[in-house]
Amino acid sequence: MHRLYLFLEVSEEEKAIIKLNRLDEIVLDETRIDISDRQRRELAEAVNDIHRKIIEESHAKQGRFFIIEHKLGDFLANPHRRAFYNGVAEANDYAIKLKTEILPRIKEIIATNSQTGPTSETFEL
């Protein structure tokens, strides 16, 4: 197993922008885990036809993949950790994706939202 650690530092102003605008909830990446093998095992272990039907309906709702969403707030947790079980190449590919896609997207989101001005106004009638 290989681990990748990301230390992303943002200023207090940027933290405030992220929190104020709820930017930490933006999904930047996702991991899709194929669970079809587990589903086949569950079907094989079904006790009877009713149990099998319940399992099949559950699988139909769930789909073939379990999806883990990685939100902007997850990347701000220092360190942001990610484990890779399929070798160094997988970890290196993700490091490249961080540099070329995810980190520029985070920078763009913060820059765009920092230039929008105040999020509330007070005025008298």
Image (cartoon, rainbow, N blue to C red):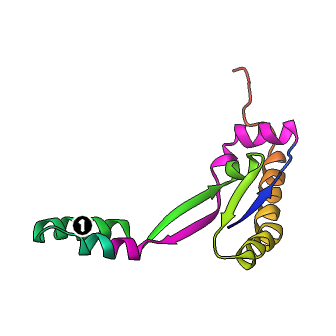
Q: Residue at x 11, y 71 (%)?
A: 49
Most extreme residue toward the top is 124
3 vs 13: above or below = below
Q: Tell me the quarter of the picture where residue 27 sits.
A: bottom right
Q: Residue at x 82, y 72 (%)?
A: 100
Residue 28 left/right relative to 118: left
- The quadrant in which the N terminus is found is bottom right
- The quadrant in which the C terminus is found is top right
Residue 22 left/right relative to 79: left
Q: Which residue is denoted by mark 1 in the rendering?
A: 55
Instruction: Specify the amino acid type for callout 1.
Output: Ile
Q: Residue at x 11, y 66 (%)?
A: 50
Q: Position of residue 57 (x, y in %)?
A: 24, 68
**Does residue 17 belong to the magenta stretch?**
yes
For the residue pair 2 and 16, the one nearer the viewer reads as: 2
Residue 105 left/right relative to 39: right
Q: Tell me the quarter of the picture where residue 95 sits.
A: bottom right
Q: Which residues are magenta?
A: 11-39
Most extreme residue toward the front is 1
Q: Position of residue 18 (x, y in %)?
A: 74, 43
**Does residue 53 belong to the magenta stretch?**
no
Most extreme residue toward the left is 49
Q: Residue at x 76, y 64 (%)?
A: 102
Q: Position of residue 21 (x, y in %)?
A: 69, 42
16 vs 59: above or below = above
